[in-house]
Amino acid sequence: MVQLEISIGGLRLKNPVMTASGTFGHGTEFAELYDINRLGAVVTKTITPLPRAGNPPPRMAETPSGMLNAVGLQNGGLEEFLKNKAPFLRRLKTAVVVSISAGGPAEFADMALAVETSGCADALELNLSCPNVLHGAVKNMISQDCGAIEAVVSAVRKKCGLAAIAKLSPNVTDITKTALAAQNAGADAVCLINTLPAMSVDLKTRKPRLANITGGLSGPAIKPVALKLVWDAVRALDIPVIACGGITTAEDALEFILCGATAVEVGTANLTNPFAAPEILSGMERWLRENKIASLDELRGKLIA
Amino acid sequence: MRNWNCRLLSNRKIADGVWLAAFDAPKIAAAAKPGQFVHVRVPGGEHILRRPFSIHRVDGNTIKVLYRVVGAATFALSALKAGTMLDILGPLGHGFPAINSGRVILLAGGMGVAPLVFLAQKLGKKRGLTVILGAKSSSGVLCAAAFRETGARVIACTEDGSKGKQCLATVLLENELAQAGGKTTVCACGPNLMLKRAAAVCAQFKTPCYVSLEERMACGIGVCLCCPVPTVAGYKSACKDGPVFNALEVAWSNLK
Protein backbone atom coordinates (compact mmCIF):
# COMPACT_ATOMS: atom_id res chain seq x y z
CA MET A 1 0.00 0.00 0.00
CA VAL A 2 1.53 3.28 -1.07
CA GLN A 3 0.82 6.41 0.93
CA LEU A 4 -0.61 9.07 -1.39
CA GLU A 5 -2.52 11.29 1.02
CA ILE A 6 -1.73 15.01 0.96
CA SER A 7 -2.90 18.17 2.76
CA ILE A 8 -3.75 21.58 1.42
CA GLY A 9 -4.36 23.96 4.31
CA GLY A 10 -6.73 22.06 6.56
CA LEU A 11 -8.00 19.91 3.71
CA ARG A 12 -6.83 16.32 3.33
CA LEU A 13 -6.95 14.68 -0.11
CA LYS A 14 -6.74 10.89 -0.42
CA ASN A 15 -4.37 11.23 -3.36
CA PRO A 16 -2.70 14.05 -5.30
CA VAL A 17 -4.55 13.66 -8.60
CA MET A 18 -6.89 16.57 -9.22
CA THR A 19 -8.60 17.80 -12.37
CA ALA A 20 -7.80 21.16 -13.96
CA SER A 21 -10.63 23.65 -14.09
CA GLY A 22 -12.32 23.95 -17.48
CA THR A 23 -11.36 20.46 -18.64
CA PHE A 24 -13.74 18.50 -16.44
CA GLY A 25 -17.01 20.45 -16.50
CA HIS A 26 -18.62 19.84 -13.13
CA GLY A 27 -17.80 16.14 -13.25
CA THR A 28 -21.14 14.77 -14.47
CA GLU A 29 -19.92 13.69 -17.93
CA PHE A 30 -16.90 11.87 -16.48
CA ALA A 31 -19.03 10.27 -13.75
CA GLU A 32 -20.77 8.38 -16.59
CA LEU A 33 -17.40 6.91 -17.57
CA TYR A 34 -15.75 6.04 -14.23
CA ASP A 35 -16.03 6.55 -10.48
CA ILE A 36 -14.72 10.09 -10.13
CA ASN A 37 -14.63 9.65 -6.34
CA ARG A 38 -11.33 7.82 -6.90
CA LEU A 39 -9.67 11.14 -7.72
CA GLY A 40 -8.03 13.25 -5.04
CA ALA A 41 -10.24 16.18 -5.93
CA VAL A 42 -12.57 17.42 -8.64
CA VAL A 43 -11.91 21.02 -9.68
CA THR A 44 -14.93 22.49 -11.43
CA LYS A 45 -15.27 24.81 -14.42
CA THR A 46 -14.83 28.44 -13.35
CA ILE A 47 -18.03 30.22 -12.42
CA THR A 48 -18.56 33.97 -12.38
CA PRO A 49 -21.16 36.04 -10.49
CA LEU A 50 -23.30 36.51 -13.61
CA PRO A 51 -23.73 34.26 -16.66
CA ARG A 52 -21.14 34.70 -19.41
CA ALA A 53 -21.88 33.82 -23.04
CA GLY A 54 -18.21 33.20 -23.80
CA ASN A 55 -16.36 34.03 -27.01
CA PRO A 56 -17.64 33.43 -30.55
CA PRO A 57 -16.33 30.45 -32.53
CA PRO A 58 -13.80 29.33 -33.50
CA ARG A 59 -12.67 28.96 -29.90
CA MET A 60 -10.11 26.25 -30.35
CA ALA A 61 -7.11 25.50 -32.52
CA GLU A 62 -4.74 22.59 -32.28
CA THR A 63 -1.01 23.36 -32.25
CA PRO A 64 1.99 21.02 -32.19
CA SER A 65 1.57 18.85 -29.05
CA GLY A 66 -0.91 21.33 -27.66
CA MET A 67 -4.08 23.28 -28.14
CA LEU A 68 -5.21 26.87 -27.94
CA ASN A 69 -8.52 27.84 -26.47
CA ALA A 70 -10.44 31.06 -26.09
CA VAL A 71 -13.64 29.83 -24.49
CA GLY A 72 -13.90 33.04 -22.48
CA LEU A 73 -15.31 31.53 -19.26
CA GLN A 74 -18.69 30.55 -20.72
CA ASN A 75 -20.78 29.65 -17.69
CA GLY A 76 -24.28 30.01 -16.33
CA GLY A 77 -23.30 32.21 -13.40
CA LEU A 78 -23.41 31.67 -9.64
CA GLU A 79 -27.17 31.25 -9.33
CA GLU A 80 -27.36 28.58 -12.02
CA PHE A 81 -24.37 26.82 -10.44
CA LEU A 82 -26.01 26.71 -7.02
CA LYS A 83 -29.26 25.46 -8.48
CA ASN A 84 -28.07 22.92 -11.07
CA LYS A 85 -24.46 21.95 -10.30
CA ALA A 86 -24.10 22.15 -6.51
CA PRO A 87 -26.48 19.25 -5.68
CA PHE A 88 -24.38 16.79 -7.74
CA LEU A 89 -21.16 18.10 -6.20
CA ARG A 90 -22.56 17.78 -2.67
CA ARG A 91 -23.14 14.06 -3.26
CA LEU A 92 -19.52 13.38 -4.30
CA LYS A 93 -17.40 11.41 -1.87
CA THR A 94 -14.18 13.10 -2.85
CA ALA A 95 -12.99 16.66 -2.31
CA VAL A 96 -14.64 19.31 -4.44
CA VAL A 97 -12.71 22.44 -5.37
CA VAL A 98 -14.93 25.10 -6.90
CA SER A 99 -13.17 27.48 -9.26
CA ILE A 100 -14.40 31.07 -9.13
CA SER A 101 -13.63 34.29 -10.97
CA ALA A 102 -15.02 37.80 -10.50
CA GLY A 103 -14.38 41.43 -11.31
CA GLY A 104 -12.63 42.43 -8.09
CA PRO A 105 -11.88 41.59 -4.44
CA ALA A 106 -15.37 42.29 -3.05
CA GLU A 107 -17.07 40.24 -5.77
CA PHE A 108 -14.61 37.38 -5.29
CA ALA A 109 -15.33 37.41 -1.54
CA ASP A 110 -19.11 37.37 -2.06
CA MET A 111 -18.77 34.45 -4.49
CA ALA A 112 -16.55 32.59 -2.03
CA LEU A 113 -19.05 33.03 0.77
CA ALA A 114 -21.99 31.96 -1.40
CA VAL A 115 -20.15 28.80 -2.50
CA GLU A 116 -19.10 28.02 1.09
CA THR A 117 -22.65 28.52 2.35
CA SER A 118 -24.02 26.15 -0.29
CA GLY A 119 -22.02 23.33 1.27
CA CYS A 120 -20.89 21.85 -2.06
CA ALA A 121 -17.21 22.81 -1.83
CA ASP A 122 -14.25 21.64 0.25
CA ALA A 123 -11.98 24.32 -1.19
CA LEU A 124 -11.93 27.18 -3.65
CA GLU A 125 -9.66 27.77 -6.56
CA LEU A 126 -9.35 31.46 -7.33
CA ASN A 127 -8.95 31.80 -11.07
CA LEU A 128 -6.71 34.86 -11.24
CA SER A 129 -5.20 33.92 -14.57
CA CYS A 130 -7.64 33.29 -17.40
CA PRO A 131 -5.86 34.77 -20.45
CA ASN A 132 -9.20 35.33 -22.17
CA VAL A 133 -10.56 37.56 -19.41
CA LEU A 134 -8.63 40.74 -18.70
CA HIS A 135 -9.09 43.29 -15.95
CA GLY A 136 -8.61 47.01 -15.32
CA ALA A 137 -7.37 49.89 -17.40
CA VAL A 138 -4.12 48.14 -18.36
CA LYS A 139 -6.00 45.00 -19.47
CA ASN A 140 -3.98 42.42 -17.64
CA MET A 141 -4.74 39.34 -15.59
CA ILE A 142 -5.17 39.71 -11.84
CA SER A 143 -2.26 37.33 -11.42
CA GLN A 144 0.05 39.71 -13.31
CA ASP A 145 -0.35 42.27 -10.52
CA CYS A 146 0.91 41.40 -7.00
CA GLY A 147 -1.25 44.10 -5.42
CA ALA A 148 -4.39 42.72 -7.13
CA ILE A 149 -3.52 39.14 -6.09
CA GLU A 150 -3.15 40.23 -2.45
CA ALA A 151 -6.38 42.21 -2.53
CA VAL A 152 -8.42 39.29 -3.91
CA VAL A 153 -6.87 36.58 -1.74
CA SER A 154 -7.15 38.57 1.48
CA ALA A 155 -10.75 39.63 0.72
CA VAL A 156 -11.68 35.96 0.21
CA ARG A 157 -9.69 34.96 3.30
CA LYS A 158 -11.60 37.45 5.49
CA LYS A 159 -15.05 36.29 4.39
CA CYS A 160 -14.66 32.57 3.81
CA GLY A 161 -13.21 29.68 5.82
CA LEU A 162 -12.63 27.25 2.92
CA ALA A 163 -9.10 26.41 1.84
CA ALA A 164 -8.17 28.79 -0.99
CA ILE A 165 -5.92 27.91 -3.92
CA ALA A 166 -4.63 30.76 -6.09
CA LYS A 167 -4.33 29.74 -9.74
CA LEU A 168 -1.53 31.75 -11.28
CA SER A 169 -0.38 32.70 -14.75
CA PRO A 170 2.98 31.69 -16.16
CA ASN A 171 3.09 35.02 -17.98
CA VAL A 172 5.00 37.05 -15.38
CA THR A 173 8.54 38.30 -14.96
CA ASP A 174 9.06 36.43 -11.68
CA ILE A 175 6.70 33.65 -10.57
CA THR A 176 8.08 33.74 -7.02
CA LYS A 177 6.80 37.32 -6.58
CA THR A 178 3.21 36.53 -7.59
CA ALA A 179 3.25 33.22 -5.70
CA LEU A 180 4.57 34.96 -2.56
CA ALA A 181 1.89 37.64 -2.92
CA ALA A 182 -0.73 34.89 -2.80
CA GLN A 183 0.96 33.20 0.15
CA ASN A 184 1.34 36.42 2.12
CA ALA A 185 -2.31 37.27 1.61
CA GLY A 186 -3.33 33.94 3.14
CA ALA A 187 -3.68 31.48 0.24
CA ASP A 188 -3.45 27.85 1.36
CA ALA A 189 -1.80 26.79 -1.89
CA VAL A 190 -0.93 28.05 -5.34
CA CYS A 191 -1.70 26.21 -8.56
CA LEU A 192 0.56 26.75 -11.52
CA ILE A 193 0.37 27.11 -14.36
CA ASN A 194 -2.70 28.35 -16.16
CA THR A 195 -2.47 28.45 -19.97
CA LEU A 196 0.15 30.51 -21.78
CA PRO A 197 -1.23 33.42 -23.81
CA ALA A 198 -0.64 32.44 -27.42
CA MET A 199 -1.75 32.71 -31.05
CA SER A 200 -2.19 30.58 -34.12
CA VAL A 201 -2.33 32.00 -37.63
CA ASP A 202 -3.59 30.60 -40.93
CA LEU A 203 -1.26 31.89 -43.65
CA LYS A 204 -3.62 30.81 -46.43
CA THR A 205 -6.56 32.86 -45.21
CA ARG A 206 -4.30 35.42 -43.46
CA LYS A 207 -6.58 35.15 -40.45
CA PRO A 208 -6.03 34.17 -36.82
CA ARG A 209 -7.32 30.67 -36.10
CA LEU A 210 -9.31 31.94 -33.09
CA ALA A 211 -12.13 34.47 -33.36
CA ASN A 212 -10.71 36.03 -30.18
CA ILE A 213 -7.34 36.29 -32.06
CA THR A 214 -5.43 35.19 -28.95
CA GLY A 215 -6.03 32.30 -26.58
CA GLY A 216 -4.40 30.10 -23.97
CA LEU A 217 -1.95 27.33 -24.87
CA SER A 218 -2.19 24.03 -23.00
CA GLY A 219 -1.18 20.41 -23.39
CA PRO A 220 2.14 18.54 -23.48
CA ALA A 221 3.81 21.47 -25.26
CA ILE A 222 3.75 23.54 -22.05
CA LYS A 223 4.96 20.88 -19.59
CA PRO A 224 8.62 22.00 -19.61
CA VAL A 225 7.51 25.59 -18.86
CA ALA A 226 5.34 24.38 -15.99
CA LEU A 227 8.12 22.21 -14.53
CA LYS A 228 10.46 25.20 -14.40
CA LEU A 229 7.92 27.50 -12.77
CA VAL A 230 6.87 24.86 -10.22
CA TRP A 231 10.55 24.30 -9.41
CA ASP A 232 11.04 28.04 -8.92
CA ALA A 233 7.91 28.50 -6.81
CA VAL A 234 8.42 25.47 -4.55
CA ARG A 235 11.78 26.81 -3.35
CA ALA A 236 10.35 30.24 -2.57
CA LEU A 237 7.13 29.20 -0.80
CA ASP A 238 6.07 27.57 2.43
CA ILE A 239 2.58 26.63 1.18
CA PRO A 240 1.91 23.70 -1.18
CA VAL A 241 2.33 24.09 -4.93
CA ILE A 242 -0.19 22.25 -7.09
CA ALA A 243 1.33 21.56 -10.49
CA CYS A 244 -0.63 21.93 -13.72
CA GLY A 245 0.54 22.02 -17.31
CA GLY A 246 0.62 19.25 -19.88
CA ILE A 247 0.38 16.36 -17.40
CA THR A 248 -0.64 13.39 -19.56
CA THR A 249 1.01 10.36 -17.93
CA ALA A 250 1.87 9.09 -14.44
CA GLU A 251 5.52 9.80 -15.23
CA ASP A 252 4.65 13.44 -16.00
CA ALA A 253 2.88 13.73 -12.63
CA LEU A 254 5.81 12.15 -10.77
CA GLU A 255 8.29 14.53 -12.42
CA PHE A 256 6.35 17.43 -10.92
CA ILE A 257 6.31 15.73 -7.50
CA LEU A 258 10.07 15.30 -7.84
CA CYS A 259 10.33 19.05 -8.43
CA GLY A 260 8.44 19.61 -5.18
CA ALA A 261 4.78 19.77 -6.17
CA THR A 262 2.34 18.59 -3.51
CA ALA A 263 -0.38 17.61 -5.98
CA VAL A 264 -1.09 17.70 -9.71
CA GLU A 265 -3.97 18.85 -11.86
CA VAL A 266 -4.73 16.93 -15.05
CA GLY A 267 -6.13 19.24 -17.73
CA THR A 268 -5.96 18.91 -21.50
CA ALA A 269 -5.31 15.17 -21.13
CA ASN A 270 -8.94 14.81 -19.95
CA LEU A 271 -10.00 16.08 -23.38
CA THR A 272 -7.83 13.71 -25.37
CA ASN A 273 -8.35 10.67 -23.14
CA PRO A 274 -11.35 10.88 -20.81
CA PHE A 275 -9.77 8.22 -18.58
CA ALA A 276 -6.50 10.15 -18.21
CA ALA A 277 -6.94 11.16 -14.55
CA PRO A 278 -7.68 7.69 -13.08
CA GLU A 279 -5.02 6.16 -15.37
CA ILE A 280 -2.46 8.67 -14.07
CA LEU A 281 -3.45 7.80 -10.50
CA SER A 282 -3.10 4.05 -10.96
CA GLY A 283 0.11 4.57 -12.95
CA MET A 284 1.59 6.59 -10.08
CA GLU A 285 0.70 3.84 -7.59
CA ARG A 286 2.23 1.23 -9.84
CA TRP A 287 5.43 3.20 -10.37
CA LEU A 288 5.87 3.80 -6.64
CA ARG A 289 5.29 0.11 -5.88
CA GLU A 290 7.70 -1.00 -8.57
CA ASN A 291 10.32 1.39 -7.27
CA LYS A 292 9.69 0.34 -3.66
CA ILE A 293 8.70 3.82 -2.55
CA ALA A 294 6.16 3.67 0.24
CA SER A 295 5.15 7.32 0.32
CA LEU A 296 5.13 10.22 -2.11
CA ASP A 297 6.96 12.20 0.57
CA GLU A 298 10.05 10.12 -0.22
CA LEU A 299 10.00 11.48 -3.75
CA ARG A 300 8.69 15.00 -3.26
CA GLY A 301 11.28 17.69 -3.88
CA LYS A 302 14.06 15.12 -4.25
CA LEU A 303 15.25 16.26 -7.66
CA ILE A 304 18.98 15.65 -7.77
CA ALA A 305 20.26 19.04 -8.82
CA MET B 1 -21.15 6.66 -24.67
CA ARG B 2 -17.90 4.84 -23.96
CA ASN B 3 -14.51 4.31 -25.46
CA TRP B 4 -13.67 1.17 -27.29
CA ASN B 5 -10.63 -0.44 -28.78
CA CYS B 6 -11.70 -1.08 -32.35
CA ARG B 7 -10.01 -2.95 -35.18
CA LEU B 8 -9.66 -1.16 -38.50
CA LEU B 9 -11.11 -3.55 -41.08
CA SER B 10 -10.49 -1.57 -44.25
CA ASN B 11 -9.40 1.90 -45.24
CA ARG B 12 -9.57 2.95 -48.86
CA LYS B 13 -9.76 5.98 -51.11
CA ILE B 14 -13.18 6.27 -52.75
CA ALA B 15 -12.81 9.64 -54.48
CA ASP B 16 -10.26 12.40 -54.85
CA GLY B 17 -9.02 13.04 -51.28
CA VAL B 18 -11.95 11.15 -49.77
CA TRP B 19 -11.49 7.93 -47.79
CA LEU B 20 -13.78 5.33 -46.31
CA ALA B 21 -12.71 3.49 -43.16
CA ALA B 22 -14.50 0.50 -41.62
CA PHE B 23 -14.11 -0.54 -38.00
CA ASP B 24 -15.21 -3.62 -36.12
CA ALA B 25 -17.19 -1.84 -33.38
CA PRO B 26 -20.14 -3.99 -32.24
CA LYS B 27 -21.05 -1.85 -29.21
CA ILE B 28 -21.03 1.39 -31.19
CA ALA B 29 -22.88 -0.25 -34.09
CA ALA B 30 -25.60 -1.47 -31.71
CA ALA B 31 -26.11 1.90 -30.01
CA ALA B 32 -25.55 4.35 -32.89
CA LYS B 33 -28.28 6.63 -34.18
CA PRO B 34 -28.03 8.52 -37.49
CA GLY B 35 -26.35 11.90 -36.99
CA GLN B 36 -24.20 10.76 -34.08
CA PHE B 37 -20.43 10.71 -34.36
CA VAL B 38 -17.36 8.87 -33.14
CA HIS B 39 -14.27 10.54 -31.70
CA VAL B 40 -11.16 8.80 -32.96
CA ARG B 41 -7.66 8.90 -31.52
CA VAL B 42 -5.37 8.84 -34.53
CA PRO B 43 -1.94 7.62 -33.44
CA GLY B 44 1.32 9.37 -34.32
CA GLY B 45 2.47 12.88 -35.03
CA GLU B 46 2.16 16.17 -33.20
CA HIS B 47 -1.63 16.19 -32.97
CA ILE B 48 -3.03 15.40 -29.54
CA LEU B 49 -6.78 15.80 -30.04
CA ARG B 50 -9.20 13.18 -31.23
CA ARG B 51 -10.92 13.66 -34.57
CA PRO B 52 -14.73 13.60 -34.80
CA PHE B 53 -16.32 11.71 -37.69
CA SER B 54 -19.99 11.22 -38.48
CA ILE B 55 -21.09 7.61 -38.42
CA HIS B 56 -21.48 7.04 -42.16
CA ARG B 57 -22.89 3.51 -42.24
CA VAL B 58 -23.64 0.68 -39.88
CA ASP B 59 -23.51 -2.85 -41.33
CA GLY B 60 -23.87 -5.51 -38.63
CA ASN B 61 -20.96 -5.05 -36.22
CA THR B 62 -19.15 -2.71 -38.60
CA ILE B 63 -19.25 1.07 -38.52
CA LYS B 64 -17.89 3.16 -41.36
CA VAL B 65 -16.63 6.72 -41.47
CA LEU B 66 -16.21 8.82 -44.59
CA TYR B 67 -13.47 11.42 -44.32
CA ARG B 68 -11.59 13.95 -46.38
CA VAL B 69 -7.84 14.19 -45.91
CA VAL B 70 -7.40 17.82 -44.88
CA GLY B 71 -4.50 17.84 -42.40
CA ALA B 72 -1.85 15.85 -40.62
CA ALA B 73 -4.23 13.72 -38.54
CA THR B 74 -6.51 12.68 -41.39
CA PHE B 75 -3.40 12.03 -43.50
CA ALA B 76 -2.07 9.78 -40.72
CA LEU B 77 -5.45 8.04 -40.55
CA SER B 78 -5.44 7.41 -44.29
CA ALA B 79 -2.06 5.67 -43.96
CA LEU B 80 -3.29 3.13 -41.38
CA LYS B 81 -3.57 -0.46 -42.50
CA ALA B 82 -6.33 -2.97 -41.79
CA GLY B 83 -5.73 -4.68 -38.47
CA THR B 84 -4.65 -1.52 -36.63
CA MET B 85 -6.40 -1.10 -33.26
CA LEU B 86 -7.83 2.36 -32.62
CA ASP B 87 -9.23 4.03 -29.51
CA ILE B 88 -12.71 5.25 -30.45
CA LEU B 89 -15.13 7.12 -28.21
CA GLY B 90 -18.77 6.86 -29.13
CA PRO B 91 -21.44 7.02 -30.20
CA LEU B 92 -21.51 10.70 -29.22
CA GLY B 93 -23.91 13.61 -29.57
CA HIS B 94 -27.53 13.95 -30.55
CA GLY B 95 -28.48 12.76 -34.01
CA PHE B 96 -31.52 13.24 -36.24
CA PRO B 97 -34.91 12.77 -34.57
CA ALA B 98 -37.04 9.75 -35.38
CA ILE B 99 -39.23 10.62 -38.37
CA ASN B 100 -42.40 8.55 -38.18
CA SER B 101 -44.58 9.99 -40.88
CA GLY B 102 -44.52 11.88 -44.16
CA ARG B 103 -41.88 12.05 -46.83
CA VAL B 104 -38.23 12.84 -46.19
CA ILE B 105 -35.74 14.85 -48.20
CA LEU B 106 -32.05 14.52 -47.46
CA LEU B 107 -29.91 17.43 -48.60
CA ALA B 108 -26.14 16.92 -48.80
CA GLY B 109 -23.49 19.39 -49.85
CA GLY B 110 -20.17 17.71 -50.73
CA MET B 111 -18.90 15.77 -47.70
CA GLY B 112 -22.29 16.42 -46.10
CA VAL B 113 -23.24 12.94 -47.33
CA ALA B 114 -21.23 11.56 -44.37
CA PRO B 115 -24.05 11.25 -41.78
CA LEU B 116 -26.90 11.05 -44.31
CA VAL B 117 -26.12 7.61 -45.76
CA PHE B 118 -26.68 6.09 -42.29
CA LEU B 119 -29.92 8.06 -41.99
CA ALA B 120 -31.08 6.80 -45.40
CA GLN B 121 -30.19 3.24 -44.30
CA LYS B 122 -32.36 3.64 -41.21
CA LEU B 123 -35.26 5.31 -42.99
CA GLY B 124 -35.26 2.49 -45.53
CA LYS B 125 -37.63 2.02 -48.42
CA LYS B 126 -40.83 2.75 -46.55
CA ARG B 127 -40.28 6.52 -46.52
CA GLY B 128 -40.68 8.17 -49.91
CA LEU B 129 -37.07 9.26 -49.70
CA THR B 130 -35.49 11.87 -51.95
CA VAL B 131 -31.78 12.68 -51.75
CA ILE B 132 -30.39 15.90 -53.18
CA LEU B 133 -26.64 15.85 -53.74
CA GLY B 134 -24.91 19.15 -54.42
CA ALA B 135 -21.23 19.77 -55.14
CA LYS B 136 -18.90 22.17 -56.89
CA SER B 137 -18.28 19.66 -59.68
CA SER B 138 -18.95 16.02 -60.56
CA SER B 139 -16.00 14.61 -58.56
CA GLY B 140 -17.59 16.04 -55.39
CA VAL B 141 -20.89 14.21 -55.88
CA LEU B 142 -20.44 11.32 -53.47
CA CYS B 143 -22.29 8.16 -52.46
CA ALA B 144 -25.09 8.36 -55.07
CA ALA B 145 -25.02 4.54 -55.42
CA ALA B 146 -25.16 4.02 -51.64
CA PHE B 147 -28.26 6.21 -51.42
CA ARG B 148 -29.90 4.42 -54.37
CA GLU B 149 -29.30 1.07 -52.63
CA THR B 150 -31.59 2.23 -49.82
CA GLY B 151 -34.35 2.77 -52.38
CA ALA B 152 -34.05 6.54 -52.44
CA ARG B 153 -34.59 8.73 -55.46
CA VAL B 154 -31.31 10.61 -55.99
CA ILE B 155 -30.98 13.94 -57.79
CA ALA B 156 -27.65 15.67 -58.21
CA CYS B 157 -26.57 19.15 -59.15
CA THR B 158 -23.23 20.91 -59.49
CA GLU B 159 -22.11 24.51 -59.52
CA ASP B 160 -20.22 23.98 -62.79
CA GLY B 161 -22.87 21.80 -64.42
CA SER B 162 -20.50 18.84 -64.83
CA LYS B 163 -23.09 16.56 -63.24
CA GLY B 164 -26.85 17.02 -63.03
CA LYS B 165 -28.40 20.42 -63.26
CA GLN B 166 -26.16 23.47 -62.96
CA CYS B 167 -27.51 25.06 -59.80
CA LEU B 168 -27.18 25.15 -56.03
CA ALA B 169 -28.60 22.20 -54.11
CA THR B 170 -31.00 24.54 -52.30
CA VAL B 171 -32.61 25.42 -55.67
CA LEU B 172 -33.48 21.73 -56.12
CA LEU B 173 -34.75 21.68 -52.54
CA GLU B 174 -37.02 24.62 -53.25
CA ASN B 175 -38.38 22.89 -56.39
CA GLU B 176 -39.05 19.69 -54.45
CA LEU B 177 -40.85 21.49 -51.66
CA ALA B 178 -42.89 23.51 -54.15
CA GLN B 179 -44.07 20.27 -55.81
CA ALA B 180 -44.51 18.19 -52.69
CA GLY B 181 -47.91 17.83 -51.12
CA GLY B 182 -48.38 16.66 -47.55
CA LYS B 183 -45.94 16.48 -44.72
CA THR B 184 -42.24 16.59 -45.53
CA THR B 185 -39.16 16.63 -43.28
CA VAL B 186 -35.76 17.86 -44.46
CA CYS B 187 -32.46 16.61 -43.00
CA ALA B 188 -29.36 18.42 -44.22
CA CYS B 189 -25.60 18.42 -43.86
CA GLY B 190 -23.01 20.46 -45.71
CA PRO B 191 -21.41 23.90 -45.79
CA ASN B 192 -22.96 26.46 -43.42
CA LEU B 193 -24.00 28.71 -46.31
CA MET B 194 -26.01 25.89 -47.86
CA LEU B 195 -27.60 24.99 -44.52
CA LYS B 196 -28.50 28.60 -43.86
CA ARG B 197 -30.22 28.83 -47.24
CA ALA B 198 -31.93 25.46 -46.68
CA ALA B 199 -33.24 26.65 -43.32
CA ALA B 200 -34.70 29.75 -44.98
CA VAL B 201 -36.33 27.71 -47.77
CA CYS B 202 -37.82 25.25 -45.27
CA ALA B 203 -39.10 28.09 -43.09
CA GLN B 204 -40.85 29.55 -46.14
CA PHE B 205 -42.63 26.21 -46.79
CA LYS B 206 -43.20 25.62 -43.04
CA THR B 207 -41.27 22.36 -43.40
CA PRO B 208 -39.38 20.92 -40.42
CA CYS B 209 -35.64 21.03 -41.09
CA TYR B 210 -32.80 19.41 -39.14
CA VAL B 211 -29.20 20.34 -39.81
CA SER B 212 -25.97 18.63 -38.84
CA LEU B 213 -23.44 21.33 -37.97
CA GLU B 214 -19.68 21.22 -37.77
CA GLU B 215 -17.38 23.05 -35.37
CA ARG B 216 -13.82 22.36 -34.24
CA MET B 217 -14.06 20.04 -31.25
CA ALA B 218 -11.75 19.03 -28.45
CA CYS B 219 -13.37 16.75 -25.83
CA GLY B 220 -16.45 15.59 -27.77
CA ILE B 221 -18.46 15.12 -24.56
CA GLY B 222 -19.55 18.64 -23.65
CA VAL B 223 -17.03 19.63 -21.01
CA CYS B 224 -14.54 21.96 -22.70
CA LEU B 225 -17.05 24.24 -24.46
CA CYS B 226 -14.71 24.61 -27.44
CA CYS B 227 -17.38 23.90 -30.12
CA PRO B 228 -20.10 26.53 -29.62
CA VAL B 229 -23.07 26.76 -31.96
CA PRO B 230 -25.02 30.03 -31.79
CA THR B 231 -28.67 29.28 -31.06
CA VAL B 232 -31.68 31.40 -30.18
CA ALA B 233 -31.02 30.32 -26.56
CA GLY B 234 -27.32 31.28 -26.61
CA TYR B 235 -24.33 29.08 -27.35
CA LYS B 236 -24.83 25.33 -27.29
CA SER B 237 -22.15 22.68 -27.80
CA ALA B 238 -21.98 21.00 -31.21
CA CYS B 239 -20.63 17.84 -29.58
CA LYS B 240 -23.17 17.32 -26.82
CA ASP B 241 -26.28 19.34 -27.73
CA GLY B 242 -25.74 18.62 -31.46
CA PRO B 243 -24.30 18.04 -33.93
CA VAL B 244 -27.88 17.89 -35.24
CA PHE B 245 -30.04 20.92 -34.47
CA ASN B 246 -33.54 21.93 -35.42
CA ALA B 247 -32.97 24.69 -38.00
CA LEU B 248 -35.42 26.92 -36.10
CA GLU B 249 -33.15 26.74 -33.06
CA VAL B 250 -30.00 27.98 -34.83
CA ALA B 251 -29.14 31.70 -34.75
CA TRP B 252 -28.20 31.71 -38.44
CA SER B 253 -27.09 35.35 -38.56
CA ASN B 254 -24.37 34.52 -35.99
CA LEU B 255 -23.18 31.39 -37.76
CA LYS B 256 -20.10 32.02 -39.88
Image (spheres, coloured by chain):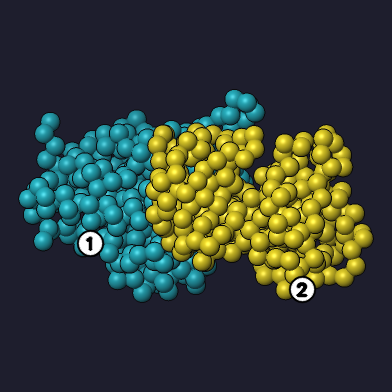
Q: Quadrant of residue B250?
A: bottom right
Tell me which chain the residue with mark 2 is part of.
B
Image coordinates of residue B233 in percent, x first then y, are: 66, 62
Mark 2 highlights which residue? Answer: B101
Dot 2, crowdedness within 10 Å: few (<14), some or many (≥20)?
A: few
Q: Amino acid at mark 2?
A: Ser
Q: Residue at x 84, y 53 (%)?
A: B173
Image coordinates of residue A95 in percent, x first then y, are: 29, 65
Dot 1, crowdedness within 10 Å: few (<14), some or many (≥20)?
A: many
Examine the rendering and report whether any part of residue A173 can be seen: yes
Image coordinates of residue B188 in percent, x first then y, are: 73, 55
Front-lying residue, A135 or B203: B203
Front-lying residue, A120 or A277: A277
Q: Nearer the viewer, mark 1 or mark 2?
A: 2
Mark 1 highlights which residue? Answer: A13
- Identify the image quadrant of the C terminus of chain B: top right
Color used for chain B? yellow
Q: Amino acid at mark 1?
A: Leu
Front-lying residue, A202 or B137: B137
Q: Left of A213 or right of it: where is B109?
A: right
Image coordinates of residue A291 in percent, x first then y, are: 9, 47
Tell me which chain the residue with mark 1 is part of.
A
Q: Residue at x 67, y 70 (%)?
A: B98
Q: Left of A123 or right of it: where is B57?
A: right
Q: Which chain is cyan?
A: A
